[in-house]
Image: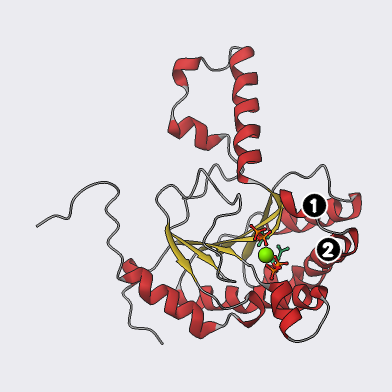
């Protein structure tokens, strides 16, 4: 399917699934139609990851700032997340996917919180693949939450300020045990990160495509992987002769 050696493939891919609204508008449909089709894409992209041997996928589904959208759109998205969990639970289990949800839960409805709890619990021992859904997520908020938790630990005397370093900080993030993303894909053409995984993407390779998320398919995904395979990830060093 793709002549890329396994060691040139990303281990963890993060995607900013953007462009649902513009996709719908282009077709003369209401924005929520874009979200409906967009949610259907998740399974398709995850299945390509399985085929390619990619182990972790983090998807930006709803940002902390997206709460500022009209209630009708927000409510539609929230009900779709619940529906996704109900509909996909069986398939996630069958495919040995461990589902995780990152973000601030306080704004979510109790019914959605229940569903998240149910599916994350019922898949927590799956080792095949990690699907990490960012819902009500903000990167700055995640850092603030980590700082709060660390401050509390210092106050309680569990750690001292001298213990704080990058490794310790990572342990207080929403994804303490997951390696940072190797590749960040943004659909919809915007060259910005929109508050996604700010700490984690320090050395992540970035791929932006103008394709709207509901149109994003295997061909586009493989194009991103091919480009990633050619990148020279130097991490500040110089190329070895
Ligand atoms: C991404 O698509 C989905 C969410 C942010 C929830 P948008 O809804 O942002 O679509 P555009 O960017 O307006 O086209
Ligand atoms: C980022 O898209 C959030 C998600 C894809 C969930 P937005 O559409 O909210 O980002 P901005 O407003 O263009 O920065
Ligand atoms: Mg957008």
Q: Which residue is mark 2?
A: 82
The numbered dot on residue 217 is none
How many marks the image carries: the answer is: 2
Verify CB contact (< 8 Å) between mark 1 and mark 2: no
Q: Nearer the viewer, residue 44 or 234?
A: 234
Ligand 1, seen in the image, is in the quarter at bottom right
Q: Position of residue 145 (x, y in %)?
A: 66, 33
Of the pair 178 and 226, the residue shown nearer to us: 226
Distance from disc 1 to disc 2, alpha carbons, whole Å, reads: 17 Å
Q: Which residue is mark 1?
A: 67
Residue 219 point in image, percent of width and height: 49, 85
What is the quadrant of the C terminus in the image?
Answer: bottom left
Instruction: Determine whether the residue tagged by mark 2 lies in a helix, strand or loop.
Output: helix
* Residue 58 placement, left or right of 137: left
Question: Outermost residue toward the left?
Answer: 241
Q: Secondary structure at mark 1?
A: helix
Say which residue appears at 57% left-offset and 83% top-offset: 217
Residue 46 at x, y percent in the picture? 59, 73
Decide: is 68 above or below 22: above
| Left or right for 71, reference 194 | right
Q: Residues within 10 Å of mark 1 (few under 14, many from 20)?
A: some
Decide: few, some or many residues near mark 2? Use Cα within 10 Å; few <14, some 14-19, many ≥20.
some
Q: Earlier in the sequence, mark 1 or mark 2?
A: 1
Quarter in which the N terminus is drawn: bottom left
Percent x, y for residue 225? 41, 73
- Residue 148 sits above or below residue 154 on the image: below
């Amino acid at each position: 399917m793709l002549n890329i050696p396994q060691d040139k493939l990303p281990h963890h891919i993060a995607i900013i699934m953007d462009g649902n609204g513009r996709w719908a508008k282009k077709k003369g449909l209401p924005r929520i139609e874009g979200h409906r089709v967009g949610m259907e894409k998740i399974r398709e992209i995850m299945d390509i990851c399985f085929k390619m041997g990619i182990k972790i996928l983090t998807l930006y589904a709803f940002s902390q700032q997206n709460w500022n959208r009209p209630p009708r759109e927000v409510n539609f998205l929230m009900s779709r997340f619940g529906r996704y969990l109900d509909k996909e639970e069986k398939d996630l289990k069958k495919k040995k996917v461990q589902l995780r949800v990152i973000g601030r839960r306080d704004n979510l409805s109790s019914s959605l919180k229940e569903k998240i709890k149910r599916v994350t619990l019922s898949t927590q021992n799956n080792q095949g693949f990690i699907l990490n859904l960012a819902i009500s997520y903000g990167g700055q908020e995640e850092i603030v939450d980590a700082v709060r938790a660390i401050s509390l630990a210092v106050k309680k005397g569990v750690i001292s300020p001298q213990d704080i370093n990058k490794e310790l900080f990572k342990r207080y993030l929403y994804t303490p045990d997951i390696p940072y993303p190797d590749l960040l894909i943004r659909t919809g053409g915007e060259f910005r990160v929109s508050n996604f995984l700010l700490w984690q993407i320090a050395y992540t390779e970035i791929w932006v495509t103008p394709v709207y998320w509901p149109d994003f398919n295997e061909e586009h995904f493989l194009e991103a992987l091919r480009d990633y395979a050619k990148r020279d990830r130097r991490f500040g060093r110089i190329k070895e002769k």
